[in-house]
Image (cartoon, rainbow, N blue to C red):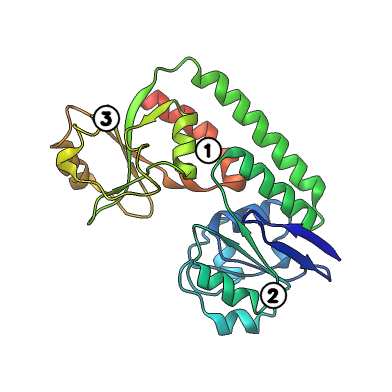
Amino acid sequence: MKSITDQIGRNIVVSKPLKRIISLVPSQTELLVDLGLENQLVGITKFCVHPAHIKNTKEVVGGTKNIKIEKIKELKPDIILCNKEENTKKIVEMCELIAPTHVSDIYTLNDVVGLIKQYGKLFSCRTESTHIIGKLQFKANNFKKFISTQPQKKVAYFIWRNPWMVAGNNNFINHLLQMNNFENIYSDKARYPEIELKRIRLEGDPELILLSSEPYPFKEEHAFEIGRFTHHAKTIFVDGEMFSWYGSRLLKAFDYFKQLHQRI
């Protein structure tokens, strides 16, 4: 029997080996595979796109906000993995009636390390989790040295249109913006606020507009639309996975960030 407190303070007790895992979080699905747990993974979401073959080999049980509960029951999971931001409270409550349900809650790099450690304990893969944590910490420290030579830039990180929405504070995206020495002009607003384009100069006048590749598929016309309200801000289309996916995706993110700064 194993007992662990998940990242929102819930005690998770498992009484048997976890041979059947359902992941309702794309970044955590990728992490599980990199921890060597692909064979134990039986269910994923339609947004679990890494590694590329995973959707062809595992049962898709819906999205992150709308799950097929009967299909999850049929898969007879030993554990279900959720995230406080990606999944709703109702989804977590439904999953708890089927199997032990672990909920992650990620705001910082330390939270990511904590999650990987928890998975190492839960799934008896401490060697693999320690290896990933070591590589992650090395890349993060190397990036900190790199970024110390880069000037600070004021940015606005857009995630949605109609209504226009950006990354504010108290989320993992903002943490990574800070690590990149980007000053988020909307860091005084909570979570993912709606904003008025016509007020963008008054609210911070960013030097850079970052248009995320997810969840909204921004195009050139959107960059032009935003640009009309800025004071010569440079617009950059960025890989949203690198700024919002935690877990092993971060092993690629820090190299991506270096390349991003070379484009600025």
Quadrant location, the C terminus: top left
Label 3 CA crowd tier, 10 Å (few <14, some 14–19, many 20+): many
Quadrant location, the N terminus: bottom right
Q: Position of residue 170 (x, y in %)?
A: 46, 43
Q: Position of residue 175 (x, y in %)?
A: 49, 37
Q: Gap in Å between the C-alphas at discs 1 and 2?
A: 33 Å
Q: Is residue 8 left or right of residue 240?
A: right
Q: Gap in Å between the C-alphas at discs 3 and 1?
A: 23 Å
Q: Is residue 157 above or below residue 152?
A: below
Mark 1 — residue?
253
Sequence-wise first label, 3 or 2 = 2
Picture residue at 56% right of the left edge, 25% below the top: 143
Judging from the image, what secondary structure is the residue with disc 3 in? loop
Q: Is residue 190 above or below residue 150?
A: below
Sequence-wise first label, 3 or 1 = 3
Q: Which mark is residue 206?
A: 3
Picture residue at 75% right of the left edge, 40% below the top: 131
Q: Which mark is residue 99?
A: 2
Q: Gap in Å between the C-alphas at discs 3 and 2?
A: 47 Å
Front position in the image: 41 or 194: 194
Residue lying farthest to the top in this orientation? 149
Q: Is residue 139 above or below residue 220?
A: above
Judging from the image, what secondary structure is the residue with disc 1 in? helix
